[in-house]
Image: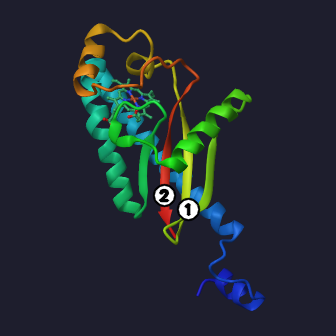
């Protein structure tokens, strides 16, 4: 039995109660995984852009990003993905909890908070089960994001995006906007 569990028993604290230490530990693990995900994605995107330009990188984004998400979800036994209020891939639609967090992120941004460390986490009860949920904002950088998410997307890139994502809403972003968020669900 873990030390904190023994302590909890001795102190008469119900074991189902989530301690602040447990929350912080799960948040810290989530931050590490987000860093891995973002790092892997950035590296893939960079090399694809270098090799074949944005047109080829579209395929990389469309296959590599979901593949990394799946791989990491399997590795950790969590659900790990990206989502947004303005989607390119309709399969990434936020659920109601994610939507409310994304909206809170927008409010926090308007209040002047820096996007670099913007995150939110809490324990949520769903169908009688507790889950630890974590989200981290994804800022839009001028380079390379705007080539595929900005207002002046080159016609050949726009055409390729139209073909693959006929309902694409992930355009018209500016540098400094919240493009979306990483989202992690850890079963408890
Ligand atoms: C080469 C074009 C390209 C570039 C450059 C690019 N993206 Fe994307 N982005 C895409 C494509 C294509 C998708 C859809 C991926 C999929 O099918 O899951 C996407 C999806 C996303 C998503 C997932 C949510 C959604 O709308 O489907 C986020 C978040 C995102 N991009 C952020 C960024 C950020 C931040 C940058 C800059 C660091 C960036 N992208 C640069 C093409 C690009």
Compared to 186, does 42 lie above or below?
above
Farthest residue to the bottom: give it: 10
Compared to 132, does 54 lie above or below?
above
Residue 115 visible? The answer is: no
Query: Residue 11 location in percent, x, y?
Result: 77, 87
Q: Classify residue 59 by image quadrant.
A: top left
Query: Which residue, given by chain and number where applicable, does mark 2 sit on?
Result: 185
Instruction: Compute the Cα span from label 1 to label 2.
Output: 6 Å
Q: Residue shown at 67%/30% (left/top)?
A: 109
Total number of numbered labels?
Answer: 2
Query: Which residue, given by chain and number where applicable, does mark 1 sit on?
Result: 132
Whether residue 10 sits left or right of residue 68 in the image: it is right
Whether residue 129 sits left or right of residue 112 in the image: it is left
Q: Nearer the viewer, residue 143 or 169?
A: 169
Q: Classify residue 39 by image quadrant.
A: top left
Q: Secondary structure at mark 1?
A: strand
Q: Residue shown at 34%/37% (left/top)?
A: 90
Q: Residue shown at 43%/61% (left/top)?
A: 78
Q: Residue shown at 29%/26% (left/top)?
A: 57
């Amino acid at each position: 039995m873990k030390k904190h569990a023994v302590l909890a028993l001795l102190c008469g604290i119900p074991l189902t109660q989530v301690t602040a230490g447990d929350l912080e530990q799960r948040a810290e693990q989530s931050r590490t995984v987000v860093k891995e995900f973002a790092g892997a994605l950035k590296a893939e995107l960079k090399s694809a852009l270098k090799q074949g330009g944005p047109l080829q990188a579209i395929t990389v984004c469309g296959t590599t990003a979901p593949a990394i998400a799946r791989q990491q979800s399997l590795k950790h036994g969590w659900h790990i993905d990206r989502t947004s209020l303005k989607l390119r891939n309709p399969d990434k639609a936020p659920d109601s909890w994610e939507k409310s967090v994304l909206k809170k992120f927008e409010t926090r941004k308007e209040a002047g908070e820096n996007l670099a460390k913007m995150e939110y986490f809490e324990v949520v009860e769903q169908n009688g089960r507790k889950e630890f949920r974590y989200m981290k904002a994804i800022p839009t950088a001028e380079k390379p994001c705007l080539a595929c998410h900005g207002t002046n997307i080159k016609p050949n890139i726009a055409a390729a995006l139209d073909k693959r994502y006929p309902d694409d809403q992930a355009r018209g972003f500016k540098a400094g906007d919240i493009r979306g968020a990483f989202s992690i669900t850890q079963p408890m």
